Image (spheres, rainbow, N blue to C red):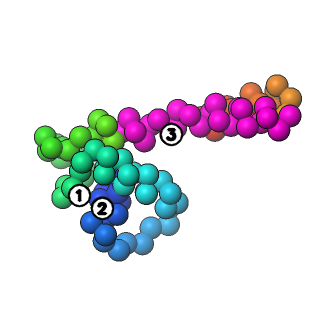
Amino acid sequence: MAKFGAYYINATFYHDAHPQLSKMLIGLSEVLAVFDGSFTFPSGQQYPEDVNYTFMRVFNASFGVTLAPLAYFTLRNIGCSPNAMLLGGLLVC
């Protein structure tokens, strides 16, 4: 996934069938981590010292962590039953 973010940073055209918002958020995490897009994240290789992959992973994981509570409180605000709120929160996990 991180190599797609590097495509955004380097302004390289590519075609991908997956949702673009997630790729743009990965690109944002790479920009915030001061990643220059030079490493292409090949499988099985060590990350260079200048790649702050920990920040990139935590940044992206924070969106996943907030997803279940967001679904729960959205269902709560539209007036669903407690069982529906619980189910909605569990379905996005």
Is residue 78 rendered magenta in the image? yes
Quadrant in which residue 68 is drawn: top right
Which residue: 44% across, 67% down? 16
Is residue 62 rendered magenta in the image? yes
Q: For the residue labelled by badge 3, is the local secondary structure a helix, a strand or a loop?
A: helix
Q: Give the magenta-colored segment's residue range.
A: 57-79
Q: Can you give x and y, in whole percent of width and height, for residue 23 in the image?
A: 43, 57
Mark yes or no: residue 11 visible. yes
Q: For the residue labelled by badge 1, is the local secondary structure a helix, a strand or a loop?
A: loop
**Relative height, residue 70 to residue 82 (above, below):** below
Which numbered tag is attached to residue 63? 3
Which residue: 83% across, 38% down? 78
Which residue: 33% across, 42% down? 56
Q: Earlier in the sequence, mark 3 or mark 1?
A: 1
Residue, far top: 82
Instruction: Give the main secondary structure, helix, strand or loop, of the magenta stretch.
Output: helix
Q: Can you give x and y, in whole percent of width and height, for residue 9 in the image?
A: 30, 61
Three-letter amino acid code at disc 1? Answer: Gly
Q: Earlier in the sequence, mark 1 or mark 2?
A: 2
Which numbered tag is attached to residue 9? 2
Q: Can you give x and y, in whole percent of width and height, for residue 20 in the image?
A: 49, 61
Q: Nearer the viewer, residue 19 or 78?
A: 78
> Rounded to the nearest whole Å, what is the CA distance between mark 3 and mark 2?
20 Å
Residue, far left: 49
